[in-house]
Image (tube, grey):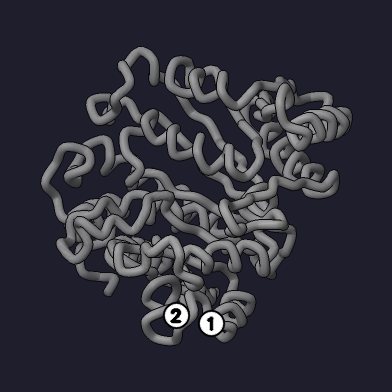
Amino acid sequence: MTAYRVAYLPGDGVGPEVLAVARRCVEATGAVHGFSVAWDERLVGGAAIEAAGTPLADETLDHCRAADAVLLGAVGGPRWSDPTASVRPEQALLRLRSELGLFANLRPVRALEALADASPLRAEIRAGADLLIVRELTGGLYFGVPQGRTADGAVDTCTYTRSEIERIARLAFELARGRRGLLTSVDKANVMATGRLWREVVESIHAEYPDVTLEHALVDSSAVALVTRPARFDVLVMENTFGDILSDEAAAIAGSLGVLGSASVGERRTDHGRFGLYEPIHGSAPDIAGRGIANPAGAIESAALMLRWSLGETEAADALAASLDATLSEGPRTADLGGSASSAAFGDAVLERLGVPTGVAA
């Protein structure tokens, strides 16, 4: 039996609750498909600040490097929300992405027909939408220098190099080649110098992928199109801040932030696949933490992406993704989708559709 090692970072708020459900699903899937996972659990975010005064300990980072993949929960909450604080939970995310070389965040968004009533979009608008947002993750405003408060204000710097754009563009073209062959590059080339460089570099990389259709679009018009004509998109690639905003907007297509997972990957390969960090895109939701009602679908989706990308367990990933889709389509539903199921009950339904009796996975 193949054994994998996953760094398990539950985080804050509802993070531990939804990740526990995803962990059960991975363990049950492994029991069916002949692999096991050793979970290396570590503190991150606010919980790590409380325990050690830092959102990401050096030792935790070392354990992440040594693992086959990282499964991460949301971080943050009111206890650590002081904007003047020098140590904040979100700093853990930026450091993980930077030091693990995770330059690309992949966020798949699909419009399941059965969730039409959960989406604010009309059914005919969202029908058939199946897109992938590829967000550059280690450049732009979140990492540019100078950054911080000044004597009478604040400054953030948006900066990109040609090589940073080239590597994200190549990955996006590869992904588009494996899907429907359309890549939309999103920028703000009419105003921003980084946007003009972005467009120039993506256009130059297109020559390596003549079988992929490339189109350029401004971020503002793309924001409109995402909620008026989402089915026209296949793969979208964009810089860090635009990707952060548009991928959350795209949750309206799916029906809830709670159903979307993500994969953050780089160039590093392991014996099993591409090393990556996997996390649901929703926040820590402190208002419902501890009540056992958070939607674990995004965490389960992230776990399925982990099985596929980092562990190389394609059949297991397909099985888990299909069971998740069936549960989202047929129920039970959690509160964010109009139902009343608990997080655990939703997970039990996924396990049952996997053909695993409830309670097999701890």
Please name the residue shown 58% across and 62% down the image: 94
Instruction: Tell me the SS state at disc 1.
Output: loop
- Marks 1, 2: nearer the viewer: 1
Mark 1 or mark 2: name the one nearer the start of the chain: 2
Residue 42 tag number: 2
Query: Which one is in front, 184 or 98?
Result: 98
Up-down relation of residue 39 to residue 140 (above or below): below
Residue that carries the numbered disc 1 in the rendered image: 57
Q: Residues within 10 Å of mark 2 (few under 14, many from 20)?
A: many
Verify CB contact (< 8 Å) between mark 1 and mark 2.
yes
Cα distance in 3D space between marks 1 and 2:
9 Å
Q: Can see residue 3?
A: no
Residue 242 horizontal/vertical position (percent):
58, 37
In the displayed structure, does residue 113 sit left or right of residue 146? left
Please name the residue shown 33% across and 50% down the image: 297
Hey, which quadrant is residue 113 in on the image? Answer: top left
Q: Can see residue 61?
A: yes
Q: Residue furthest front?
A: 152
Residue 212 horizontal/vertical position (percent):
75, 25
Q: Residue furthest top?
A: 124
Hey, which quadrant is residue 25 in on the image? Answer: bottom left
Q: Amino acid at mark 1?
A: Ala
Query: Which one is in front, 233 or 226?
Result: 226
In the displayed structure, does residue 151 sit left or right of residue 80? right
In the displayed structure, does residue 78 sit left or right of residue 299? left
Residue 323 horizontal/vertical position (percent):
33, 47
Q: Amino acid at mark 2?
A: Arg
In the displayed structure, does residue 62 sit left or right of residue 213? left
